[in-house]
Structures are given as C-alpha cells and as structure tokens.
Amino acid sequence: MKQHNSRCLPQSSPSDRPSFVSDHGPAMKEIARGQSLVTQLRAIVLPALQADQRCELVAQMFQNILDCSSRAITELQLQHQSDARPDDSMVDDKKRVRKISSDDCIKEEGATANPHHQHKRRRSIDTVSLETPVPHYDGRQWRKYGQKHINKAKHPRSYYRCTYRKEQDCKATKTVQQQDESTGTDNPVMYTVVYHFQHTCKDNNGVDSGTDESETNTLSSSDSRSSISTTCTDPCDHQTSLCDNKLIEKSADLVTKSLYEPLNMNPFAPLDLDYWELDALLRFHLEPDN
DNA sequence: AGTATTTGACCGTA
DNA sequence: TACGGTCAAATACT
C-alpha cells in the first residue's frame, strides 16, 4: 500500500459539496451539522464497542439517525428548490443534479453486469452526503479505485468502492473530497463524503450490512485490508497542522489514550482511527465556532 | 508473491 | 466537447 503518497490525499472543493449543506437555510445547516457530529461520534464509539455484542445495534442506530436526517434534508431541499439561487459554489453541483436526475441513471444498477458499460451518472436518491473531519472512518472497508481532479475544485476527488464488491457483489461506493475552505490553519480539515448505494455485503464478522433502512457498520477485522480507506493515505498535511498547537496535541494524546486503552484489552479490536483523524476530531470540537 | 494504490485512458452523459 | 465516473496496467507496499 502507498498510504503515505501525497497523491492519494483525500481532497475536495465547496463546489462539490452536496447542495443541502451550503445554501438551503439554517434548518438544513443544522441537520447537516448533526449528521457530521453523529458521524464523528460513530467514529469514536464503534471502535470502543467492537468487542461488545451491542456494537451491531449501535452501528445500526447510528446509520438510522443518519438516514433520517438525510431524508429530512431531502424534504427540505425540495421545499427550498424554488428559492435556490445559483452561485459559483453551486455550478458543479447543479451540473451533477442535472445529470443524475436523468432517466438513464436508473439503468445503473442493472449495468453492473457489464463492467464496461457502467459509466452512468448516479441517482440522487441512492446517495447520502455528509461533512466530516474523519472521512475515512465509517466502520466499513473501502478500496480506492480512482482519483480525479474535479473542475473548479482545488482538491481531487477520491473514489472508493466496497472491498467486497467482487466477492459479494456489493454496490456500495463513496467519494471523498476535501473542502476548499477547510485548508486554513485555524479550521479543521473538513471533507465531503458521498455514499452511493447501500451495502449488501457481509463484513468480516459475517454481519449482514445491507438493508433498506439501515446499514450495520460493524467494525472491520484487523487484517491489512482494514486500513484501506479507514486510514488516511497521506497524513502529512494533518500532522503539520497538529504540530503548531500544543493544546490540541495534549488533548489528542488524552483522547488517543482513552480510545486505545479499552482496545488494548482486546487484541482483536484494532482502532482504525488514525492520529490525524483524532486530531481532526479534536480540532473540530475545540474550535469556538464549532 | 499477494494486495492495495496510483493514474492515464476510456466511456457515457449533458 | 467538457465533465464525472470507472477501468486496468503499472507501481508501491507488506
């Protein structure tokens, strides 16, 4: 693996943020923020619960919460549609909406039988978007299959698919893109993560992960694959920002200890949260405005 | 040697 | 024709 190659750093731009995040009023912003917080909380809670029988239930509840908020956002989005005003940050997004709303996208799921004919735009109803400082930890095993520079975006978009795509025909994919405005030294690095399709695979623990209403994010095993995308492939940028803040450094140390200690009791429960991700979490919550 | 990642090329859509 | 999404050979890592 080339985890420290800068070319695979997850990056993004505001132009590719899901439209609900940016411009559809305080209600949607609050819901989006709630999604982000739940995602971060999940990244902390699930590793600690891995050996616990309730882990599956907790993961499912997390996913249900995220699904609920996504649906709420979708409803609000429809209500605000008529009031939406185009601006620079929405150009790409609108383009995507136009593309994915076309009828041909419906053919995508069936098109997977022929790998050479699946370059179709995705259906918006199958996507869930959220903002998070920890884009790589969601309790799932992902394999990166592409990275592309997106028009008018500072950072490239990374494309991931479920590790078990071939074995179990799981169609779940996600894209990760760093937001442009998060590159400042005072702000935590934020990423837009867009999930496409539900997992239909069973993970290494044999837990069925795919249902219509929930996604069971049971943690991955400790083999080498678990770091496919649950770890940042280039932590350099994040660590740079960490070094100039001793307070955060100490806090990160405390949190790191608190997270690792229970795991040390269970050698089969690896923590897939990298140091930079803990840093990102800490920075996100220590910021006065967050 | 096996596996994951990178990256240019290709494809479908608008 | 521009763009986003995917493929697959080359490369890197363990």
Image (tube, coloured by chain):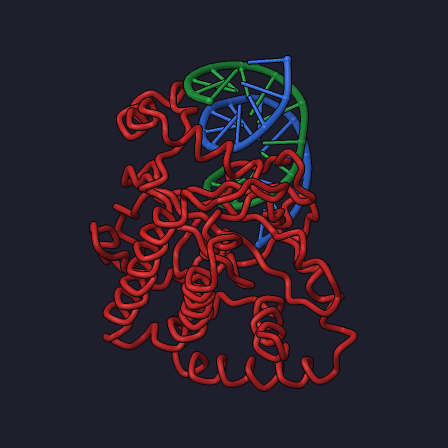
Chain colours: A red, B green, C blue
Q: Residue at 51% x, 42% y: name it.
A: A144
Residue closest to the far front: A83
Front one among A49 and A40: A40
Quadrant position of residue A223? bottom left
Residue A143 position within the rendered picture, expressed as x and y whole percent measured from the top left:
47, 44
Residue A199 position within the rendered picture, expressed as x and y whole percent measured from the top left:
30, 48
Front one among A153 and C9: A153
Q: Left or right: A74 with respect to A143?
A: left
Quadrant position of residue A68? bottom left
Q: Left or right: A29 with respect to A50?
A: right
Q: Residue at 51% x, 32% y: name it.
A: A95
Residue A203 position within the rendered picture, expressed as x and y whole percent measured from the top left:
30, 54
Above or below, A6 against A222 in this view is above
Q: Quadrant of the C terminus of chain A?
A: bottom right
Q: Left or right: A190 with respect to A187?
A: left
Q: Residue at 34% x, 27% y: name it.
A: A105
Above or below, A172 against A252 in this view is above
